[in-house]
Structures are given as structure tokens and as C-alpha cells.
């Protein structure tokens, strides 16, 4: 529970700081955003952002020395991404790095610590995030769509097929099929229709991160664990009807 609370605090902090760092861009191009529209002041956003960042860091540091060290790296990645993502073309890699270290932070708090499988699972998630992030960037550039980043979306499936053997094979195949079908359903909105809807594709892929997480624990989780992840996946889709996913 402490791990989930700490990670959530860092995630919320990242969203606040993202708006704070993007203030000049939003004032020019997205005046409907909370700060330019006057719904909240810039100073308040900075305070909330660093407040959440501090709270999440304290909670996670208390979980152990290794967790604390990895949290410090994750914290730096979050702030760096928020500060420069509008100015560099490789910002999807920074976003993926945040997700990579989030996995390692979670693994470090577990009984077995950071195992090789945890590291490879983190790489697979990072590749997935790079793919969806590059797709999301093309929504704002309005240029020709490049399909190659979408090939990275299947990295978690490839890893699951390689590492799950014996009694874990059939559950992994089922989950791989589930994630694969969802990816196809999402990218179809960007590449297989007459009027591409990248926003809808990206929103679906963001919800699909829950399925990537489920695939990462497929070998050691119970049926109830799988049900919990599926419930979270459905919950993410329902929440997107209220708060657009970006």
C-alpha cells in the first residue's frame, strides 16, 4: 500500500509540474488549460507539484535503501521530462525512462528485490511507452503518420513469450492474445480508417499499460490478481470518459 501511495504521489506531482513547466506554451496554444484560464495560479501549481513530489519521495525512501536510491533517480527523470519534453525530440525516451525506473522501484520493495526478469519487464514497458509516446506526438505535429514506432508496442508480448514456459505458458499465451488484440484495436484508429483519430488510439494504449503490467506478473500471480488488473483496466477506460487521456 505504501508503494502504491508513494508512486501515486510522484505521478500526481509529475502532472502538476508538467503544467507548470508548460505555462508559456499553454498561454500561446492551449489557453483552456487550468493555469492560462485562471482556474489556478502558477505559484499554486508549483507548490502542489513539489509538495506531492516530496510526499511521494518520503514514503518510498522509508521502504528501504535501494528503493530510496531508485526513487531519487525516478524523481530526477520526472522533473527532467517535465522541464524539457516540449523542446527535445527524444522526450518519449525520457517518459519511457520514468516508467522503467517505476518498475525497478516497485521490484526493489518486493521480497526478491530487483531481479533480471524485473529489469527486462521494465525494458519491455519502456519500449511500449516509447511507441505510444511517438504516436501521441504525431497528433500535435499533424504530419504524415509514421507506423514504425508502433512496432515497439509488441515488446511486452515478445518478452512474455520468451520467459513463460511450462505451466506458465498457456496463461501467458492468453494474456498475450488479449494485449495483442487490444493493441491492434487501438492502432486501427490511427492507421486503418479514412479519418485517423490519434487521440483515441493513444487513450486506448494508455489504458493498455494495465495489461502490460498484468503480463509482467503473469507467471507469479493468482486468478484474483488477474481479475484485479482487468478491473483496473476497465476502470481506466471508464475514467477516460470523464477525463481525457493524454
Image (cartoon, rainbow, N blue to C red):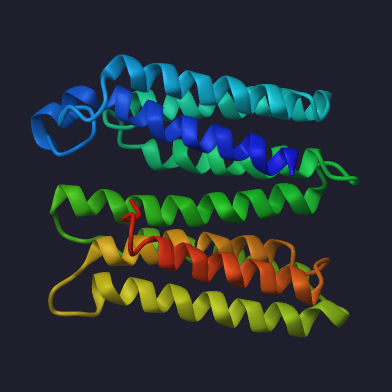
Seen at 9% across and 29% down, the residue is 28
Seen at 38% across and 79% down, the residue is 185
219 sits to left or right of 111: left
Looking at the image, the residue that sits furthest to the front is 39
Looking at the image, the residue that sits furthest to the left is 28
Seen at 62% across and 28% down, the residue is 56
The front one of 73 and 37 is 37
Seen at 41% across and 61% down, the residue is 239
Does 165 appear above or below 54?
A: below
The front one of 38 and 189 is 38
Residue 158 placement (x, y as % from top left): 62, 69
88 sits to left or right of 236: left
Residue 82 lies in what quarter of the image?
A: top left
Residue 75 placement (x, y as % from top left): 57, 25
Residue 60 visible in this rendered orientation of the protein: yes
Residue 165 placement (x, y as % from top left): 82, 76
88 sits to left or right of 210: left
Residue 101 visible in this rendered orientation of the protein: no
Amino acid at each position: 500500500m505504501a508503494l502504491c501511495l508513494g508512486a501515486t504521489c510522484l505521478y500526481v506531482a509529475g502532472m502538476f509540474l508538467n503544467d507548470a513547466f508548460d505555462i508559456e506554451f499553454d498561454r500561446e496554444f492551449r489557453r483552456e488549460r487550468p493555469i492560462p484560464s485562471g482556474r489556478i495560479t502558477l505559484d499554486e501549481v508549483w507548490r502542489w507539484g513539489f509538495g506531492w513530489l516530496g510526499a511521494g519521495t518520503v514514503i518510498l525512501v522509508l521502504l528501504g535503501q535501494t528503493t530510496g536510491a531508485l526513487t531519487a533517480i525516478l524523481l530526477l527523470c520526472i522533473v527532467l521530462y517535465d522541464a524539457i519534453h516540449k523542446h527535445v525530440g527524444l522526450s518519449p525516451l525520457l517518459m519511457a525512462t520514468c516508467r522503467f525506473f517505476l518498475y525497478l522501484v516497485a521490484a526493489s520493495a518486493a521480497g526478491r528485490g530487483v531481479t533480471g526478469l524485473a529489469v527486462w519487464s521494465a525494458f519491455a514497458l519502456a519500449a511500449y511507452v516509447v511507441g505510444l509516446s511517438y504516436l501521441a506526438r504525431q497528433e500535435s505535429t499533424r504530419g504524415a503518420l509514421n507506423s514504425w514506432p508502433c512496432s515497439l508496442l509488441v515488446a511486452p508480448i515478445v518478452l512474455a513469450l520468451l520467459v513463460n514456459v511450462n505451466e506458465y505458458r498457456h496463461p501467458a499465451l492468453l494474456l498475450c492474445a488479449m494485449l495483442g488484440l487490444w493493441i491492434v484495436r487501438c492502432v486501427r484508429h490511427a492507421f486503418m480508417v479514412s479519418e485517423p483519430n490519434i487521440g483515441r488510439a493513444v487513450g486506448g494504449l494508455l489504458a493498455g499499460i494495465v495489461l502490460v503490467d498484468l503480463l509482467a506478473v503473469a507467471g507469479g500471480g493468482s486468478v484474483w490478481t488477474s481479475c484485479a488488473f482487468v478491473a483496473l483496466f476497465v476502470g481506466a477506460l471508464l475514467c477516460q470518459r470523464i477525463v481525457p487521456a493524454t
